[in-house]
Image (cartoon, helix red, strand yellow):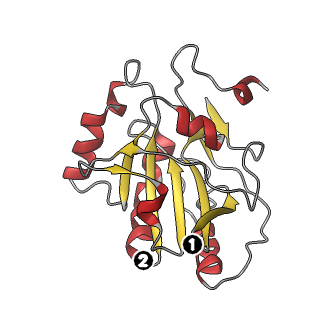
Amino acid sequence: MALESVEDVLQRGDEAPAFDLPGTDGRHHSLEDFAEFEALLIVFTCNHCPYARAKIRELNRLAAGYEDLAVVGINPNDDSEYPDDSFEQMLSEVEHGTIEYDAYLRDESQSVAAAYGARCTPDPYLFENDGGTFRLAYHGRLDDATNPDDEPSEREMKAHVEQVLAGETVTAEMKPAMGCSIKWRSGNEPGYWNA
């Protein structure tokens, strides 16, 4: 069942919640690791979901296309129920060159996904660097292809990234991302999940 992202936890202008997560590069990463970038695109994603897989190419293009943008994938899914989302499989995706983000991180506790209000994979959050603090500029879909088999006609996040990098405010209304639900461990569902 596909799920849509919603704007009910982080609002525009809110500070990005802190994290310290292991990456496929063998290092732990926090927001401070991306302080040199003018914009930060955090995408809650995974390996197995067809919606998430359909957006890998676009995320790779964004990561390669802008020196001042960091693209960070965070995988929060329960890998005991979905073994394709294990850290080992994340490493494989990176080693085979499928995923070429600036960082691909594992949210084993699922606490980071909950802090951001993530609901689906992929669920993208674009932040602007405001004097060393990342503030939410836009939360919503990457492009106008809402089904995995569709070809996008408009690269919407690309336009939002360019606005942020130009020092402009993103005024576009949120267009929700569509994807598989985040696979919470039993009892780990955040308060907003059933709200």
Q: Residue at position x 36%, y 62% from top?
A: 102
- Residue 175 lies, in percent from the top left, at 73, 56
Q: Left or right of 194: which side holds 145? A: left
* Residue type (three-letter) at the residue carrying disc 1: Lys
- Label 1: which secondary element: helix
Label 1, residues with CA under 10 Å away: few <14, some 14-19, many ≥20: some
- Can residue 59 be spotted in the picture? no
Quadrant, the C terminus: top right
10 is higher (above) or lower (below) than 136: above
Q: Earlier in the sequence, mark 2 or mark 1?
A: 2
Toward the top, the furthest residue is 186
Label 2, residues with CA under 10 Å away: few <14, some 14-19, many ≥20: few
Q: Residue at position x 61%, y 74% from top?
A: 131
Q: Identify residue for label 2.
A: 65
87 is higher (above) or lower (below) than 138: above
* Residue type (three-letter) at the residue carrying disc 2: Gly
Report the front residue among 47 and 147.
47
Q: How many marks?
A: 2
84 is higher (above) or lower (below) than 66: above
Q: Residue at position x 65%, y 36% from top?
A: 3
- Residue 165 lies, in percent from the top left, at 58, 81
- Residue 177 lies, in percent from the top left, at 64, 49
- Residue 2 lies, in percent from the top left, at 62, 35
Q: Left or right of 47: which side holds 150? A: right
Toward the bottom, the furthest residue is 166
Q: Left or right of 22: which side holds 6? A: right
Q: Identify residue for label 1.
A: 158
User: Is there CB contact under 8 Å for labels 2 and 1?
Assistant: yes
